[in-house]
Amino acid sequence: MTGSVEVTLLDYGAGNLSSVEKALVHVGFRVSRARRAAEIVDRGALIIPGVGHYAATGALGGEFRAAVAQHIRRGAPLLGICLGLQYLFEGSDEAPDVPGLGLLAGRCFRLGGDVKVPHVGWNTLETVGDSRLLQGIGRLAVYFTHSYAAPVTGQAVATTTHGLPFASVVERANVFGVQWHPEKSGEAGLSVLRNFLEVARSC
């Protein structure tokens, strides 16, 4: 049963936990929150949410980083949402002294060009590679709210353009990330969370 899959939300005070939790329960996850690093160990799946300034990830100290690394080594899936996706990379120009997890190569940058920043509202995903998160899903319009974004590298499976192109969905082995908010993106977002549920079931 899908209800047997447990997912842990990393709770570091970076917002949007309640809406994410509601969406996860809706698609069939059993959800718990981790406020201490020890609560990450031996969970089925892990999600790092986040809204706000990259400096907020500085609250995730060495014990959290070690627990996330252990989670990845076990082959369990990890999904970063919005700020959580950016944290998967090496760092961000928004808070240059705060290191990211370094699970994906590259640094996040501020959006620019002849557009309004922050990028808030609906935009489309352009798929650029095979994706388990996007499997069986057609062209998507999803909801964004951010000023910084991740570079388009080999781990990008979908991109979006707002002044500049950026990685809007990333995947590498059991590490996944979405720059947008599945919990605010209607059926499209729920479909992606259902696919993440299937990934978690297979691990």
Image (spheres, rainbow, N blue to C red):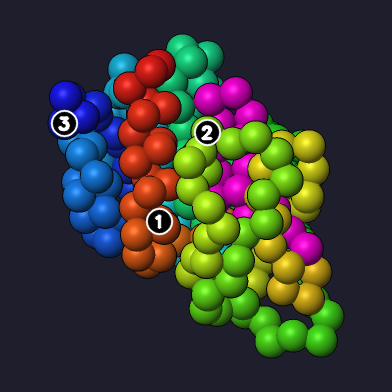
Q: Please say whether residue 113 is one of the residues in the magenta stretch.
A: no
Q: Quadrant of residue 111?
A: bottom right
- Reading the image, the residue beneath label 3 is 3
Q: Amino acid at mark 3?
A: Gly
Outermost right residue:
113
Mark with earlier residue (2, 3): 3
Q: Is residue 130 above or below residue 193?
A: above
Place of residue 115 in the rendered image (x, y in percent of width and height, measured from the top left): 74, 85
Q: Amino acid at mark 2?
A: Arg
* Frontmost residue, 182 versus 104: 182
Exactly how many numbered labels are in the figure?
3
Query: Any mark on residue 189, and which?
Result: 1
- Reading the image, the residue beneath label 2 is 132
Place of residue 119 in the rendered image (x, y in percent of width and height, measured from the top left): 62, 77
Left or right position of 167 against 183: right
Disc 3, SS: helix
Disc 1, SS: helix
Q: Is residue 9 above or below residue 114?
A: above
Left or right position of 170 against 111: left
Range of residues picked out in magenta: 165-178
Mark closer to the observer (2, 3):
2
